[in-house]
Amino acid sequence: MITDLAQILITTLTVGSMYALVAVGVSLIYSATGVINFAQGEFVMISGMTVAGLYGQLGWPLAPAIGVALVAVLLYGALLMVLTTGLARRTSLIGVLIITIGASIATSGTAARIWDSDTHRFAPFSGDAPFWVFGATVTPQALWIIGVSTVCVAGLIWFMRSTMVGKAMRACSLDKSAATMVGIPVQATVMVSFLLSGLLGGVGGIVTTPLTTVDAYSGMLLAIKGFSAAMLGGMGSIVGALLGALLIAFIETVTVTFGSSALKELPTFTAIILVLLLLPRGIVGGRQEAGLQHEDLTKQ
Amino acid sequence: MLELANISVSYGFISALKDVSLNVDEGEIVALIGSNGAGKSTLINTCAGLVRPGGGEIRLRDRALLKTPSYKRAELGIAVVPENRRLFGEMSVRDNLCLGAFSRSSMGRMPDLKQDIEMVFALFPRLAERQSQRAMTMSGGEQQMLAIGRALMSRPQIILMDEPSIGLAPKIVARIFEVIRQLREQGKTILLAEQNAAASLRIADRAYVLELGRITMQGKASELWEQDKIRKLYLGENKT
């Protein structure tokens, strides 16, 4: 029993950390632009494939391979920003959403051309030898995933709450006109959101690939999981995205432990539908209702 | 200080401002009075850069502004107290004030804001008590004080106020107008768009009357106050 619990806990944390990096990225871009970025999983795929190619196959040292992967996701983030906010300015929000889906498919296809359609991985950072905690198997890479994700998400929360740029980003997501009036360049904060989002996904690809493997088409499912987690937690909230990711990971882990891995997605998406029926704004989203209600006042 | 020359604005086929010229000199309070829909907010938003005029020119200290993007106008010294306050509701009072000074930061680095925050707290002691509270949880009057405080944080050359008295209890309105008068004594320059003609003419130096997008009267506030037409137009509805 203890063993089961410990195993569920460690697996939930590992998988949840991976989903959280995607979900928080989805949430960041949503706050900045109102767009749900279905290409968010491609950041993970691009960085995973890059490191697998350079470090795993070509034998580069790990550090420069990671450097190249991060530069690649930053460039991809900038490209997505141009696609979704620049070229797409004349279309509707739904149009932009479809652009992100298109971008995701195009990216997978391009990646399959550049590399191949096979599954890739590379060696874990600290070896393969697992150890046991209360009878549960823990791989060193799982600890890397949990540790690095925690540092990234905690760092992001600190950045948004305590730095001027972070506060400016929150201000833009709350009220773009008011932000402009106090002198915040809204476009620049949108760019920062895309780049940070890209970095989160990129880091996710780097730490998870040794454990989960990667292929050219693995981005889309991750994006859907990340989107679901962000939605479940309350779109636009970082803490919400984190909670949503952990909840989805927990449900999946329990299903796989006591049921079958073929059924993995069923309880997850059932739970998402239930939560959204009961709490349409997600777990932490209820507070948005008490907003400033500018519109109500203008009617007086 | 601020000068609008022949500004025209239209939203589609509807013309909101027609050939409006107006100027605000240093150290003045200039009132812009008019009823709902007269174009007051359009004029303020045009100065702030949120609305692009079809023709005319805006100058701040002889510098043409129309090509300047709106966020850079804050840097040049234009601060806005927007209609309905537009605070960052989910953020704390203190964060709202800090963001008010955003235009003074460079590369995300803030100058020391202690003095400015103290100055705002001296003006509105209520905000000091509530500094870590979220802005949207405060009363309408407190929110309006915060909106004015936020505008002051940028150390502006001119403050554009859009209906600061709207939706507030008479006692709070009196307090807000008292503060606006104090700001003028400190040498601030203010363009005050208001429906409340009586209260604004009392504190203003000069005033313009805006009707259906045109300026129909202008002059010293005290002289406009004497005119029967203004009394008839605006006093019937706005008793203070």
Image (cartoon, rainbow, N blue to C red):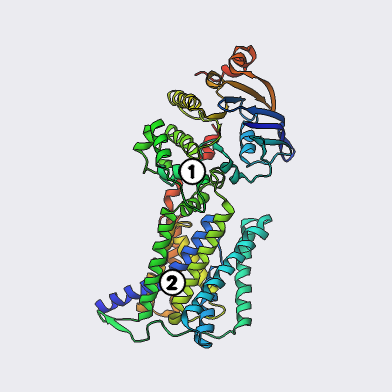
Q: Is residue B139 left or right of residue B52?
A: left
Of residue A218 and residue A174, the one placed in the foreground of this image is: A174
* Whole-percent x, y for residue A271 in the image: 42, 65
User: Residue A124 is drawn in which quadrant?
Assistant: bottom left
Which label number is shown at residue B234?
A: none
Give the residue at mark 1. B101
Secondary element under disc 2, as helix, strand or loop, is helix
* Whole-percent x, y for residue A51 in the image: 51, 80
Of the residues shown, which amino acid type is indicated by label 1? Ala
Of the residues shown, which amino acid type is indicated by label 2? Met
User: Residue A274 is drawn in which quadrant?
Assistant: bottom left
Q: In this view, does A277 lie to the left or right of B79?
A: left
| Mark 1 on the same chain as mark 2 | no
Of residue B115 and residue A129, the one placed in the foreground of this image is: B115
Give the residue at mark 2. A18
**Chain ID at mark 1:** B
Answer yes or no: is residue A243 visible: no
Answer yes or no: is residue A129 visible: yes
